[in-house]
Image (cartoon, rainbow, N blue to C red):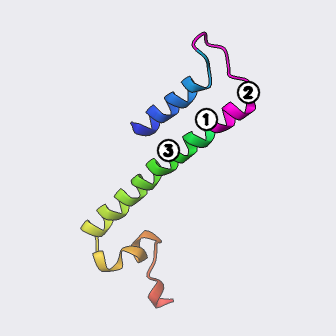
């Protein structure tokens, strides 16, 4: 939901109140840079939540092995 909201905010910020696109490249670049930063935070939170769930529910001592699909010690 938060990523959807961020994307909606990005889209809305790329247009003025009359619906005309913003054309100044610096303004567009700054808007996109801010979006990417916020999006990366959200994606990191998803990844971290997944890792925490895995560690809490499936073999906590070998979480890294399971995450990457194999038992690296046996190779």
Camera-side residue: 46 or 29? 29
Q: Is residue 36 left or right of residue 70?
A: right
Residue that lies at the very extreme toward the bottom in this rendered image:
74
Disc sitting over residue 2 in the figure = none
Disc sitting over residue 31 in the figure = 1
Q: How far across and down, in percent of the image, does residue 37 sit?
A: 54, 47
Q: Which residue in the protein does label 3 denote?
A: 38
Q: Earlier in the sequence, mark 1 or mark 3?
A: 1
Q: Quadrant of residue 47?
A: bottom left
Q: Earlier in the sequence, mark 2 or mark 1?
A: 2
Q: How far across and down, in percent of the image, does residue 44 sit?
A: 45, 55
Which region is colored magenta?
A: 17-31
CA gap between label 2 and label 1 equals 11 Å
Q: Is residue 70 left or right of residue 58?
A: right
Q: Which residue in the protein does label 2 denote?
A: 24
- The local secondary structure at tag 1 comes to helix
Q: How far across and down, in percent of the image, does residue 5 sit?
A: 44, 32
Q: Is residue 13 magenta?
A: no
CA gap between label 3 and label 2 equals 22 Å
Q: Quadrant of the N terminus?
A: top left
Identify which residue is drawn at 55% across, 31% down: 10
Camera-side residue: 9 or 61? 9
Identify which residue is drawn at 42% across, 69% down: 67
- Answer few, some or many: residues within 10 Å of disc 3's Cα (few below 14, many 20 plus, some between 14 and 19): some
């Amino acid at each position: 939901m938060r990523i959807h909201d961020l994307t909606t905010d990005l889209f809305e910020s790329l247009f003025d109140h009359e619906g005309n696109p913003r054309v100044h490249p610096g303004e567009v670049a700054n808007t996109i840079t801010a979006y990417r930063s916020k999006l990366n935070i959200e994606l990191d939170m998803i990844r971290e939540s997944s890792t925490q769930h895995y560690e809490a529910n499936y073999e906590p001592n070998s979480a890294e092995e399971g995450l990457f699909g194999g038992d690296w010690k046996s190779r």
